[in-house]
Amino acid sequence: MGSNSSRIGDLPKNEYLKKLSGTESVSENDPFWNQLLSFSFPAPTSSTELKLLEEATISVCRSLVENNPRTGNLGALIKVFLSRTKELKLSAECQNHIFIWQTHNALFIICCLLKVFICEMSEEELQLHFTYEEKSPGSYSSDSEDLLEELLCCLMQLITDIPLLDITYEISVEAVSTMMVFLSCQLFHKEVLRQSISHKYLMRGRCLPYTSKLVKTLLYNFIRQEKPPPPGAHVLPQQSDGGGLLYGLASGVATGLWTVFTLGGVGSKVATASELSSPLANQSLLLLLVLANLTDAADAPNPYRQAIMSFKNTQDSSPFPSSIPHAFQINFNSLYMALCEQQTSDQATLLLYTLLHQNSNIRTYMLARTDMENLVLPILEILYHVEERNSHHVYMALIILLILTEDDGFNRSIHEVMLKNITWYSERVLTEISLGSLLILVVIRTIQYNMTRTRDKYLHTNCLAALANMSAQFRSLHQYAAQRIVSYTCRHLRRYVYVLDKLYFPHSHCSTLQHCFSTLSDNGEELLSLTCSHILRSYASSLFSLLSKKHNKVLEQATQSLRGSLSSNDVPLPDYAQDLNVIEEVIRMMLEIINSCLTNSLHHNPNLVYALLYKRDLFEQFRTHPSFQDIMQNIDLVITFFSSRLLQAGAELSVERVLEIIKQGVVALPKDRLKVVNTLVQALSFLFDVFYDSSSH
């Protein structure tokens, strides 16, 4: 671009760019390259300026696409860059600013050109452009066929071997971003690329030995969160927002790749403060995730995924098995702290999920930590602010909880960690609460939000699975957590009766019920000024009698309607009938969660017994329900047992006195009278295994 260019608007008229993209061949030894690479202009600071840069350079890039088969100037530029990188490490040690500046500029131009080339041609055509030399039109030399592989290998060497200094920070970012651009070919294919040329070079040949070193360097870049050097400390003009020109360019590519490997479009992604504060860390994380999610080759597994699956703690002195390739060691404590601090970004949450899911060393280490609240609280905050997060971020946070709650030790320990003044939880002031009780509150809130807004079946099923995993180890539940477990169950029990009433008595259904459910608030609070017994006693007997005869048929019709399998002559069931299956599923899951807690840790949870007694009128109506009879036995037993003890104690009992009676009664209740029911745990374990299998492919 030359020293004459100081503004983006001047680029289309720049004489050096015209010569690069024109019909004249330029030898790699020509002094022209020093002139071309001596440019500097303000980096774009917004998407509008970034678009202006692309519009300003598109004509130059297309001209090069047209003329490069005759001139071979793209290959010459790449060779100039490759020759300079051989002296880059020495230049960094000698503080040779000018040399590093020009090398950076060469890589910057290459990346800008590659972005356009990849957008406008196939990988096969791109590879041909790397082979063209200064010869007759369309000819190429066989000894330069590996220039693409050499460039990729050089980028890996630059990332892993060049020391990170103020003067090398920008070129390190550019190297990571250029690799991202190479891998962006997937963006232009609807199907998953399984035989990409770039993938082939990265998974075998000269690049393969750098696998573990590259993964380790990218992880440490994420851990260290190095900020860009201050103005004047490096060779290129620095913007106050952080990041170089190419960082802005590659961020768009990185965002698109994030969209691809999270299985759907998440819209435009606004950079977070952490992403802007450390472009190198952010770009390194994105590249690491893309590499880890490359498809396996036909004859070999993805080596980058293998490296992520097998690395160990630096404090682990045991030898690596010979069967594990690409193994390395990294400081787990530093990685853990970085993961705790960076969960505001969806890519950091995806990294955490990937490590917990695929690396047993990391999973074991994290579950053994005594400060798990530092990791769990940011995850809970993601779920709590579900309205502000994209669906992929929420799902990753939820699956992380599922993985953690599969461990009984984790489920016990979170009830021993006491928290004070959770400022982001706004429904109620929580001056002191256990981490376990807070987790329950947030998960129930997420289920409730999903049931009323997004209505995603798998989201609420996974939320309930996390509660089910924890239920046997519930300890000293906070009174609000116990109340929310019971009140959320009761809300669906009421809703269930209301739906049945509309199904069986569509012309004369209870107007009181209709009014009651219109007063239900979104946050699941109690019905206004109405008791459970007032709502249900007139209808429960007739409904459940009829239900025993018609229930299965109605559910079958509702399921068929949901699947769109009703014939054209049938009248589709209304929306509330279609919800019947989902409501019943949620009710049964919640009842089994309560049952699991009562069976395994009744003596630890007087607040849950208190909440059940407070709502006993509603639960009593479901004793004979054909779908819930088996699971209601333990709950009914507990309610009956403690109700009788309260009756013996007299009327007008204070809350404190009731809790005291419950604690005394727990000792007197024979444990063998409570039956163990494992259907929920088995079903959800199967469901989670299926999810694991599908997410691994």
Image (spheres, helix red, strand yellow):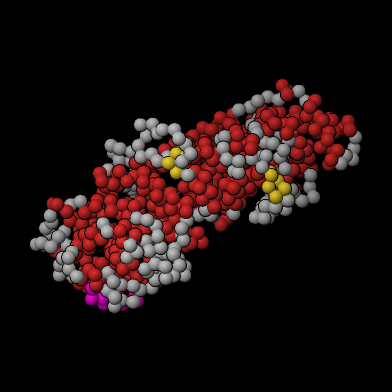
Left or right, 556 with respect to 196, comes to right
Q: How many numbered circles does the render carry?
A: 0
The answer, for residue 509, to whether it is visible in the render is no
Which quadrant does the N terminus fall into?
bottom left
Residue in the picture at 56% in, 37% down: 368
Write down the quadrant of residue 58 in the picture. Answer: bottom left
Instruction: In the displayed orientation, state which residue is furthest to the left.
Output: 136
The x and y percentages for residue 562 are 52, 43
Query: Which stretch is magenta?
Result: 7-16
The x and y percentages for residue 498 are 68, 43
Instruction: In the displayed orientation, state which residue is furthest to the front.
Output: 94
Write down the quadrant of residue 37 in the picture. Answer: bottom left
Viewer-nearest residue: 27 or 573: 27
Compared to residue 630, the image places residue 470 above or below, namely below
Viewer-nearest residue: 494 or 277: 277
Left or right, 41 with respect to 143, comes to right
Residue in the picture at 83% in, 33% down: 661
The x and y percentages for residue 488 are 68, 43
Left or right, 641 with respect to 156, comes to right
Compared to residue 617, the image places residue 575 above or below, namely below
